[in-house]
Amino acid sequence: MGKNKNDSMNENYIDVIYDEKTKPLTDYPHKLTAHLIEKLNIPKDSKLLDVGCGRGDFLNGFINSGCNGYGVDFTNAAEKYCPDAKLFQADIENNGMPFEDNYFDVIFSKSVIEHFYDPDTLIRECKRCLKPGGMIIVMAPSWEYNYRIYFEDYTHRTPFMKTSMRDILEMHGFDKINVSFFKQLPLLWGAWRYIFGPISYLTQILIPRFFSNKFKWVRFSREIMLLGVATKSK
């Protein structure tokens, strides 16, 4: 059977977005996942699903911290990079997720929801697959801070702001909702934030975006994420 157009596009997306020459593997995913586990008190034996796991960079981070890791994506790219996970391939927006109800303790997604034409589908499926009392963690670029470059990735479909992220979680019946701005700079996650936080803020407002391509500190001081965390009601 021949490949359809979507299969070819998915393969091309991986070749471009996850090309190791332009996006090499780093230790950042392990730092972020360790930070989230500590910040959110995630038990290390949690059954965790990474939705839109891509290569599995963050999924590997959770697994290395002790989580029982599952991944789902429309491509099979993670098979090469994430051998210790239970991996599934699915078109979530059109066909849902291939998991039974009330299955996961934690569902994580990073830079995924903004790629959906209908993000309600993603949140609805996440809630269905979470156990009562389970946690959803949703990260997405903040439109407020990234609108000038948001559509440099032409596969972005639905922008999110802090209010709209909170609204979509609340409309789907999640509890204990917290949405915050998040900078992808590990120096800002611990005690060093009291020193480097003001420097990052000054960088954000004073240094031209031109320098973002040259210095990660500039890029991630300016390209601020949303971090949405909520709990499925028991």
Image (cartoon, rainbow, N blue to C red):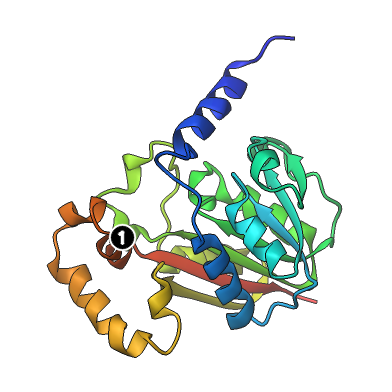
Going 60% across and 45% down the picture, which residue do you hit?
A: 55
Q: Position of residue 34 (x, y in %)?
A: 60, 73
* Residue 52 shows in the view: no
Going 45% across and 32% down the picture, which residue do you hit?
A: 16
Going 78% across and 58% down the picture, which residue do you hit?
A: 129
According to the picture, the residue beneath numbered tag 1 turns out to be: 216
Q: Dot 1: what SS? A: helix
Up-down relation of residue 78 to residue 229 (above or below):
above
Left/right placement of residue 105 relative to residue 193 reads right
Q: Please state which amino acid type lies under the numbered disc 1.
A: Lys
Which quarter of the rendered picture does the C terminus lie within?
Answer: bottom right
* Residue 115 shows in the view: yes
| Residue 2 picture quarter | top right
Left/right placement of residue 124 relative to residue 191 reads right
Q: Nearer the viewer, residue 41 or 64?
A: 64
Q: Nearer the viewer, residue 81 or 116?
A: 81
Q: Position of residue 208 (x, y in %)?
A: 14, 59
Classify mark 1: residues with Cα within 10 Å, few (<14), some (14-19) or many (20+).
few
Up-down relation of residue 179 to residue 49 (above or below):
below
Which quarter of the rendered picture does the N terminus lie within?
Answer: top right
Going 72% across and 57% down the picture, which residue do you hit?
A: 49
Q: Position of residue 19 (x, y in %)?
A: 47, 36
- Count of marks, rendered view: 1
Q: Nearer the viewer, residue 184 or 216?
A: 216
Up-down relation of residue 180 to residue 143 (above or below):
below
